[in-house]
Image: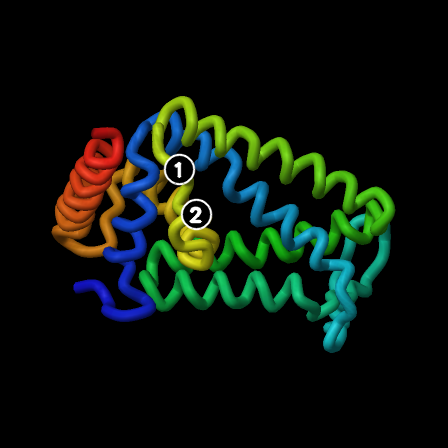
Amino acid sequence: MGKGGLFDLERHFAFYGAYHSNPVNVLIHMLFVWPIFYTSLLIFQFTPPFFHLHLHLPLPGGGDALTLPFNFAFVGALVYALFYLFMDKKAGSLAAILCFLCWFGSHALAVRLGFSLAWKVVLAAQLFCWSFQFIGHGMFEKRAPALLDNLSQAFLMAPFFVLLEALSLLGYEPYPGFHASVRSKIDTDRKAWQASKQKKAS
């Protein structure tokens, strides 16, 4: 069974799914949501660190010291990772690994690019990815993005939603009956939205 309250996966997934029922729009989000998360961490890599972690590892090029800054990029990755873990242990564990890989990868890229180039890369990537997502909603979904109705929930759920969508194609289900229950909630929400839209148009 799913958890209730803040970590109610079924409720969160149904909310986000109600705004992402068109297959083309879902595919667009699968392609562009994680790059948005990654590049967001990239710009936060330039915030002042709370402390540094020094690791002694064999590195390519002959080095053996790796320094990781624990800054707002790490805090962001940690919050997302814990949120997903509390909602579902199996898929949440995979999502948490992806979050920290994005954190580690964004640190490596930040070191390589430097701030003067990194913010340009982030700006270009964010504009590109967000443009496609709005196209997905405008042309295919025919419904405004979820962030216009619940900003925090939409931003928190987006990476996990597209991961669960991908895993569901492989037959994964957090618990028996999850997909059927979510589909019922999504259908109810969309019927209410359609009725509201028709009422406004009349």
SS assignment at label 1: loop
Check contact, mark 1 vs mark 2: CB within 8 A.
yes
Residue 69's place in the image compared with 127, above or below, is below
Residue at 58% in and 41% down: 35
The residue nearer to you, when weighing 114 against 5, is: 5
The residue type indicated by label 2 comes to: Leu
**Residue 174, percent across and down?**
24, 54
Which one is nearer the viewer's eye here, 28 or 134?
A: 134
The residue positioned 61% from the left and 48% from the top of the image is 38
Q: Position of residue 163 (x, y in %)?
A: 40, 45
Mark 1 to mark 2 CA distance (whole Å) = 7 Å
* Element type where label 2 sits in the image: helix
20 w.r.t. 135: above or below? below
Residue at x 31%, y 56% (from the top left corner): 12
Percent x, y of residue 62: 85, 53
Point 84% across, 42% down: residue? 117
Q: Amino acid at mark 1?
A: Ala
Q: Which residue is mark 2?
A: 148
With respect to residue 17, does 95 lie above or below?
below
The extreme top residue here reads 139
Quarter of the picture containing the N terminus is: bottom left
In the picture provided, is 122 more to the left or to the right than 34?
right
Q: Quadrant of residue 53?
A: bottom right
Label 2 crowding class (10 Å Cα cut-off): few <14, some 14-19, many 20+? few
Q: Is residue 52 above or below residue 201?
A: below
For label 1, the residue is 144
